Image: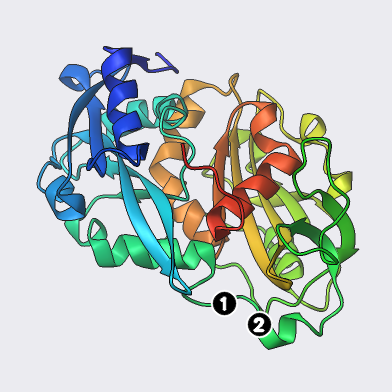
């Protein structure tokens, strides 16, 4: 079984995505599908300038499809371009075929990066301007602030800070000139008493160690800022358990926790400083190593949405299979990109 999807016409796909990203074209969406339904091959299908409604008209319940959408968010009278990556999981696609598409999903996703929001949808109610903008606002923190602005200036800091602006609040600069990650205080998040729970009827079981670790990362009273979790033997039918936690992201060494033979999940607590205002952001990482067996990848694909619900709320979702994607600075940059404090529009 193929674990990587090839592109039937690389130039057509690259041009379609480039048009969506370009400020000089009216194109605001493009759509990709699997050539003749083959999980091992994807192809550029179509694009347009009619926005989300026009894209929704192209979605087929008999197919797995992938789309990149360009939207504009207005914050304090400033317009910021945001990109949404959509995986359309047609409801008429068979269970077996879904598993095969899930195996190659990581190789498909990399063609659409960077983006601010990633969604897996199977109903048209999820492919509307209103729904996508609500997800963008949740990610950027403009819909429901994790930390009240006035409170943010008075609380001491601890944890990881992505310093995005403002002299005096910026941490030591990295060699690249980006705001570096510094060890300071854990900023308040107002997520008091949170306990991870699967949705009613969910097939995903949770070990008590995992529930306690999530509650610790969310809590303002606990110093824990990250957790690592896994399914024993990569079997999603077994309870999701916590294997590691830490109070400093400098302790989190990707090469030691993200192994090529494992499925690993992580929740990170990061403080993003924008205009002198620190806000708590959470990053959810789903690591699927290149050496994970196809059967395990297939089973994971059928429960990926349920697992994501368990880790919600979060501001950044990273699905990775290579170590450079899970470097701490890479995650911090993604947080800044999602909040608008870092620009990365191509």
- Residue 48 vs 78, above or below: the answer is above
Horizontal side of residue 66 vs 325, given as left or right: left
Crowding at label 1, few (<14), some or many (≥20) Cα neighbours within 10 Å?
Answer: some
| Residue linked to disc 1 | 145
What colour scheme governs how the chains and residues are painted in the rendered image of this protein?
rainbow
Horizontal side of residue 245 vs 201, given as left or right: right
Q: Nearer the viewer, residue 330 or 216?
A: 330
- Residue 173 vs 226, above or below: the answer is above
Q: Are marks 2 and 1 in contact (CB under 8 Å)?
A: yes
Crowding at label 2, few (<14), some or many (≥20) Cα neighbours within 10 Å?
Answer: few
Q: What's the CA distance linking mark 2 and mark 1? A: 8 Å
Of the 4 image quadrants, the one containing the N terminus is top left
**Residue 103 % position (x, y):** 42, 26
Extreme residue toward the left, this view: 57
- Residue 21 vs 181, above or below: the answer is above
Query: Residue at image x 26%, y 38%?
Result: 25
| Residue linked to disc 2 | 149
Q: Is residue 208 visible?
A: yes
Query: Residue at image x 80%, y 58%?
Result: 160
Q: Secondary structure at mark 1?
A: loop
**Residue 273 % position (x, y):** 72, 65
Horizontal side of residue 36 vs 95, given as left or right: left
């Amino acid at each position: 079984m193929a674990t990587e999807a090839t592109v039937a016409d690389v130039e057509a796909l690259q041009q379609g995505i480039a048009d969506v990203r370009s400020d000089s074209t009216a194109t605001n969406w493009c759509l990709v599908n699997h050539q003749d339904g083959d999980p091992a091959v994807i192809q550029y299908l179509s694009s347009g300038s009619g926005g989300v409604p026009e894209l929704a008209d192209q979605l087929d319940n008999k197919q797995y499809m992938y789309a990149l959408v360009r939207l504009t968010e207005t914050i304090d009278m400033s317009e910021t371009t945001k990109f949404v990556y959509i995986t359309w999981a047609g409801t008429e696609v068979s269970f077996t075929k879904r598993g095969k598409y899930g195996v190659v999903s990581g190789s498909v996703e990399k063609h659409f990066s960077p983006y601010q929001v990633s969604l897996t949808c199977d109903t048209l109610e999820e492919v509307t301007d209103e729904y996508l903008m609500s997800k963008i606002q949740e990610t950027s923190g403009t819909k429901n602030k994790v930390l009240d602005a006035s409170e943010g200036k008075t609380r001491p800091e601890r944890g990881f800070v992505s310093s995005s602006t403002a002299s005096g609040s910026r941490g030591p600069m990295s060699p690249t000139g980006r705001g570096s990650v510094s060890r300071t205080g854990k900023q308040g998040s107002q997520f008091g008493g949170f306990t991870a729970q699967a949705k009613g009827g969910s097939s995903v079981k949770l070990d008590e160690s995992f529930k306690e670790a999530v509650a610790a990362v969310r809590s303002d009273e606990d110093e824990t800022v990250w957790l690592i979790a896994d399914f024993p033997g990569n079997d999603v039918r077994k309870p999701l358990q916590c294997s590691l936690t830490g109070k400093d992201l400098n302790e989190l060494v990707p090469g030691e926790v993200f192994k090529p033979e494992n499925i690993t999940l992580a929740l990170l607590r990061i403080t993003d400083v924008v205009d002198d205002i620190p806000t708590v952001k959470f990053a959810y990482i789903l690591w699927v190593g290149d050496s994970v067996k196809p059967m395990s990848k297939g089973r994971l694909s059928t429960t990926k949405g349920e697992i994501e619900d368990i880790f919600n709320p979060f501001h950044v979702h990273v699905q990775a299979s290579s170590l450079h994607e899970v470097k701490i600075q890479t995650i911090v940059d993604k947080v800044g990109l999602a909040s608008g404090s870092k620009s990365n529009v191509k």
